[in-house]
């Protein structure tokens, strides 16, 4: 069964760059333009084995998305990586408290992303 990653970001360019990086690691990709869009696509999707989300997005931000995913039994232990321009310790703490597995800052290095993904996705 192929690994599926959902990339959630309001920037189509970021989604494209992250998606192409993850495809090289063997992932099938689902995309969401914000947290609300991502959640709406989950019902019709195969099981997701990794979420990568931005923090600041319209309609539903990354923290709210993480809380919603963690409230769903199917995604309680699925790795969720925050990929954002934010770097404040308070935001990192808030994301961790919501259930984020890890934090990467933009701009990102594709090799670094793949190293982190390899550590969190089994």
Image (cartoon, rainbow, N blue to C red):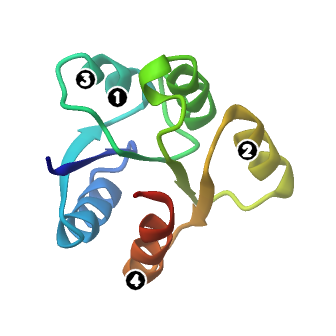
Q: Which mark is residue 41?
A: 3
**Mark nearer the viewer, 2 or 1:** 2
Left or right, residue 97 beside residue 17: right
Q: Residue at x 40, y 45 (%)?
A: 9
Nearer to us: label 1 or label 4: 4
Using the image, tell me which numbered label, if any, was put on residue 111. 4
Q: Earlier in the sequence, mark 4 or mark 2?
A: 2
Q: Position of residue 101 (x, y in %)?
A: 61, 50
Identify which residue is drawn at 25% across, 16% down.
43
Q: Which residue is tagged 2? A: 96
**Label located before the other in sequence (4 or 3):** 3
Q: Where residue 70 appears, x then y in whole percent?
A: 57, 26
Marks 4/3: CA–CA distance: 28 Å
Quote the CA–CA distance across marks 3 and 1.
Answer: 5 Å
Residue 48 lies in quadrant:
top left
Which residue has dot 1 on it? 38
Q: Front-most of 22 and 46?
A: 46
- Residue drawn at (73%, 44%), measured in percent from left and top? 96
Tag 3 and tag 1, C-beta contact below 8 Å: yes
Q: Is residue 86 left or right of residue 109?
A: right
Mark 3, other Cα within 10 Å: few <14 / some 14–19 / many ≥20: some
């Amino acid at each position: 069964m192929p690994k599926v990653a959902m990339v959630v970001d309001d920037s189509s360019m970021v989604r494209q760059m992250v998606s192409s990086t993850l495809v090289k690691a063997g992932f099938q990709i689902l995309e969401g333009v914000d947290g609300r869009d991502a959640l709406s696509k989950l019902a019709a999707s195969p099981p997701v084995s990794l979420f990568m989300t931005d923090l600041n997005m319209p309609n539903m931000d990354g923290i709210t998305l993480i809380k919603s995913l963690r409230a769903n039994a199917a995604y309680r232990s699925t790795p969720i990586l925050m990929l954002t321009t934010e770097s404040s310790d308070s935001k990192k703490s808030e994301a961790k408290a919501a259930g984020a597995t890890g934090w990467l800052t933009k701009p990102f290095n594709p090799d670094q992303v793949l190293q982190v993904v390899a550590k969190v996705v089994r």
